[in-house]
């Protein structure tokens, strides 16, 4: 498993294809409410700090450092090729990404948001050590979760 900053054009097209084949709700599930369906390459270009996930040199997904707030990094836009989910790859990738982020000395926590209906993703986040710190309901129920350095 390798996580590398950036994403090439071919892999952007993979993300577009995987997403648009599954439809509007799927786009919102992983990219949030502020992305327009259908997904386009230019919308991916506008996402800063996107990381590509590779398994045995095959591009399998993305994850993003959305923003840094003091000593916290907010992550998201986590997507694994829908044909390869449920095999432990997402968990491995997330653990690797957490490791990478916590190597930064001035970072002490990581946060993310997950929709209430995305039961599988939330379970995964709990398994690797995130816990809920906030619940919001506008327009859809979602959780903010946090993991602190050295907590797990
Ligand atoms: C969320 C996602 C990235 C996880 O990747 P994945 O490769 O499917 O996850 P894994 O196979 O590594 O599963 C990790 C753990 O989560 C649990 N899990 C995953 N999906 C689950 C589901 N639908 N229901 C219950 N548990 C689930 C598994 O039990 C697994 O735990 P285990 O390793 O102890 O058995 C992937 O499913 C995906 O791309 N989903 C669509 C986009 C999305 O919703 N992204 C998250 C936005 S917040």
Image: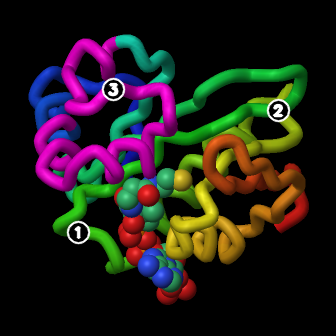
133 left or right, relative to 56: right
Which numbered circle lies on residue 72?
A: 2
Residue indicated by mark 1? 84
Q: How crowded is mark 3: few (under 14 residues within 10 Å), some or many (20 or more)?
A: few
Residue indicated by mark 3? 36
- Considering depth in this image, is 75 or 23 the residue closer to the camera? 23
111 left or right, relative to 37: right
- Considering depth in this image, is 142 or 50 the residue closer to the camera? 142
Residue 108 position within the rendered picture, expressed as x and y whole percent measured from the top left: 88, 39
User: Mark 1 or 3 closer to N-term?
Assistant: 3
Vertical side of 104 occupied by 152: above or below: below
Rounded to the nearest angstrom, the CA distance separating label 2 from label 3 is 27 Å
Disc 1 secondary structure class = helix
Report the span colored magenta.
Answer: 16-45
Q: Residues within 10 Å of mark 2 (few under 14, many from 20)?
A: some
Residue 100 position within the rendered picture, expressed as x and y whole percent measured from the top left: 62, 42
Q: Tell whether circle 1 marks a residue whose Cβ is less than 8 angstroms from ligand 1.
A: yes
Disc 2 secondary structure class = strand
């Amino acid at each position: 498993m390798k996580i590398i900053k950036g994403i090439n054009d071919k892999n952007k097209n993979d993300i577009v294809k995987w997403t648009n084949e599954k439809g509007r709700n799927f786009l919102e599930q992983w990219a949030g409410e502020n992305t327009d369906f259908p997904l386009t390459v230019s919308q991916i270009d506008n996402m800063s700090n996107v990381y590509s996930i590779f398994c045995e040199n095959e591009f399998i997904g993305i994850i993003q450092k959305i923003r840094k707030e003091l000593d916290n990094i907010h992550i998201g836009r986590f997507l694994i090729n829908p044909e390869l989910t449920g095999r432990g790859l997402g968990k491995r990738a997330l653990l690797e990404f957490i490791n990478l982020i916590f190597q930064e000395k001035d970072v002490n926590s990581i946060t993310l948001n997950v929709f209430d209906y995305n039961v599988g993703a939330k379970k995964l986040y709990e398994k690797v050590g995130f816990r809920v710190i906030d619940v919001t309901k506008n327009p859809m129920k979602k959780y903010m979760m946090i993991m602190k350095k050295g907590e797990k």
